[in-house]
Image (tube, helix red, strand yellow):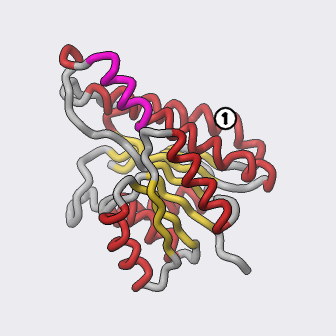
Amino acid sequence: MEKKLAVVVGAGKGMGVNIAKVFGMHDFKVAMLARNLDKLEPLTDELKNQGIEAYTYAADAASTESLTAAFQKIRQEHGSVDVLIYNAAILTAGFPTKLTSADLMEHYQVDVASALHTAKLVLPEQIAKGSGAIIFTGGGLALYPMAEYTCVSMDKAALRALAFALSQEVKEQGVYVGVVTIMGSIAPNTHYDPADIAEKYWELYEKQEDVEYVFK
C-alpha cells in the first residue's frame, strides 16, 4: 500500500524537521518546504538516513504564487496531501508604535493568510476523499500577547481563530483541523524541546478529537 503524504510548510532545524520525523517514523512520506534548500537538504538527508522517505521543495510563504507552484509539483510527483502542517511564521520583534500598516500586512501574509492559502490548496482533494488533516503551529502569544512582539501576538491569535473556524466548516466533511499552541520558547534539551512538541502533532492527528493542544 502506498504511503500517505505529510507536507510541512516552513521546515527548518527546529519544529519543522522534528514534525517531519515524527510522521516519517509512522510510515508517512514527508515533503518539507522552505525558502532555502541549502539549509533544508542536510535535514532531509538526516531523515533519509533514518529510513524516512523525505523530499524538499523551495517555496516562499510570503508568496501565494510560490506556494501554489510548489504544491502543484508535489501533487504531480506524489499525489494528494493527506496531512498539511503549516509551520511558517515571521518572529521578529516590534512594539505597536514602531510598526506600520505595511509591517502588519507583511507579517500577516506569512503567519495567517498563507496558512489559509495552503489549506485551500489541499482541501478539495481531502474533502473529496472524506479524510485528511491540517495542523497549524500556534503560539502562547495568541493567549498572552506581548507588546514587543505585537505582530506575532496578533497573528498567532488570528491563526488560532482560523483553526477553530476552519475546523467548524470542514469537520463534517471528514477533514480534521487542529493547532498546537506552544506556550514557551522552543529549544532543544529544554521543556520546550521540538522533538517532544512534535509528538503532539501526531497525537492530534491520530486522535482527531480536540482542535487545540496547548503545550505548556
* Residue 71 coordinates in the image, percent (x, y): 59, 54
Q: Position of residue 43 (x, y in %)?
A: 35, 71
Q: Residue at x 69, y 64 (%)?
A: 79
Percent of width and height locating residue 180: 44, 48
Give the total of numbered labels.
1
Magenta-colored segment: predominant secondary structure: helix
* Residue 33 to residue 212: above or below: below
- Residue 77 visible in the shown view: yes
Secondary element under disc 1, as helix, strand or loop, is: helix
| Residue 119, quarter of the rendered image | top right
Residue drawn at x 33%, y 73% as measured from the top left: 42
**23 relative position to 119: left or right:** left
Q: Residue furthest top?
A: 97
Instruction: Name the side, left or right, on which 113 lies relative to 181.
Output: right
Q: Name the quadrant of the N terminus.
A: bottom right
Q: Give whichever of 3, 210 is nearer the camera.
A: 3
Q: Which residue is mark 1?
A: 168
Magenta span of residues: 100-110
Query: Residue at point 39% right, 34% down?
Result: 156
- Percent position (x, y) of residue 136? 49, 46
Residue 180 appears in view: no
Q: Residues within 10 Å of mark 1 (few under 14, many from 20)?
A: some
Looking at the rendered structure, the kind of residue marked 1 is Gln
54 falls in the magenta region:
no
Of the pair 176 and 69, the residue shown nearer to us: 69
Q: Residue at x 34, y 66 (%)?
A: 195
User: Is 104 part of what is drawn in magenta?
Assistant: yes
Is 143 positioned to the left or the right of 32 in the image? Answer: left
